DNA sequence: CAGAATCCATCGAGATACTG
DNA sequence: CAGTATCTCGATGGATTCTG
């Protein structure tokens, strides 16, 4: 267990870097959040973001492909015309979402502390 | 609580995006891991990475500044010559590290599953 | 409908050289 | 020692157009 913790340093393990990257990129967590629950089609998924901040199909496709490659999202194709493709979360994806939730919740809980730190830092910088 | 969970979608909250970005970028988590424990000086910190994958002072400086701005790392200057600057983790930083550890540990636990998903995906892609 | 192809702007990371 | 100043390069995000 302590040997595992040591892996937080060093990126000898590529998988770790990749999963952490999913947390950091702009869309992965949001897509995973939308894909949770009922299976959802590509265009419906795209529409979910239309209000807040629209995502291009180019970027949505790339994000989904990555998540599928990581085993977090599954893709099911129905051989009909027009095409029907459904995405949803895998077990691995659900666990990932759980951890993401935890950090997001923690961040929101301490939002005031973050903003205070930010203000103090800016004040120090301006002081010079 | 459920209203907080809703925030995983939508980036209305800038702080959330920024903290998740720290998890995702190449150096933040590793620097935080090294800064945990005893206070450490800039050059010593830089040396810690020299073996595995060296970090330029340019990048280390930027990473530390960001973490300081976020309130995860504190910076203490000693008015001596040559200069002496010590970095260490704040309380917020320790909590952040805790969550990062959790995800890293989880990732390593399921490393086999990730690699299997990867192989299957590549196989499917090649099949066409 | 579910993407693929093309092109462009921006940004993070890194190498290198220099300084109070 | 602890950075700053410049520059380059590749990856990410995005807009737009096209297609089986």
Image (tube, coloured by chain):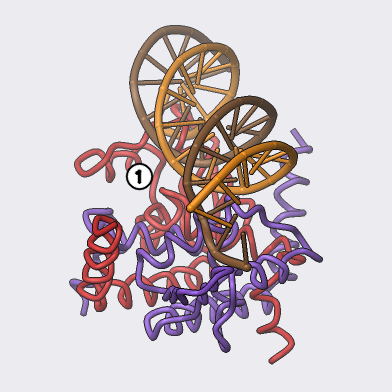
Chain colours: A purple, B red, C brown, D orange
Instruction: State which quarter of the image contains the N terminus of chain B.
Output: bottom right
Residue at left offset 70%, top offset 82%: B6
Task: Name the image quarter holding residue A60.
Answer: bottom right
Residue found farthest to the bottom: B1
Residue found farthest to the right: A51
* Of B57 and A46, the residue lying toward us: A46
Q: Position of residue A77 (x, y in %)?
A: 45, 74
* Of D13 and C4, the residue lying toward us: C4
Residue at left offset 75%, top offset 59%: A53
Residue at left offset 47%, top offset 81%: A89
* Of B116 and B65, the residue lying toward us: B116
* Of A94 and B52, the residue lying toward us: A94
Residue B85 in view of the camera: no
Task: Name the image quarter holding residue A19.
Answer: bottom left
The residue marked by circle 1 belongs to what chain? B
Secondary structure found at label 1: helix
Residue B79 in view of the camera: yes
Q: Position of residue C1 (x, y in %)?
A: 63, 68
Left or right of B17: which side holds A54?
Answer: right
Does B50 appear above or below B105? Answer: above
Other residues around mark 1 within 10 Å, as few (<14) / some (14–19) / many (≥20):
some
Q: Quickly name the residue at label 1.
A: B45
Q: Position of residue B101 (x, y in %)?
A: 37, 72
Task: Name the image quarter holding residue B15.
Answer: bottom right
Left or right of B29: which side holds B107?
Answer: left
Q: Position of residue A49 (x, y in %)?
A: 72, 66
Residue at left offset 60%, top offset 75%: A104
Does B92 appear above or below B26? Answer: below
Left or right of A128: which side holds A91?
Answer: left
Does B100 appear above or below B73? Answer: below
Instruction: State which quarter of the image contains the C terminus of chain B.
Output: bottom left
């Amino acid at each position: 267990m302590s040997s595992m913790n040591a892996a937080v340093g060093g990126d000898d393990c590529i998988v770790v870097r990749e999963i952490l990257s999913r947390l950091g990129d702009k869309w992965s967590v949001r897509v995973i959040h939308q894909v949770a629950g009922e299976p959802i089609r590509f265009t419906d998924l795209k529409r979910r973001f239309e209000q807040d901040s629209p995502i291009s199909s180019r970027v949505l496709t790339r994000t989904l492909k990555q998540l599928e490659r990581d085993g977090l999202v599954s893709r099911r194709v129905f051989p009909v015309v027009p095409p029907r493709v459904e995405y949803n979360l895998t077990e691995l994806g659900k666990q990932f979402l759980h951890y993401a939730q935890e950090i997001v919740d923690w961040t929101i809980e301490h939002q005031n502390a973050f903003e205070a730190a930010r203000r103090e830092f800016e004040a120090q910088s301006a002081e010079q």
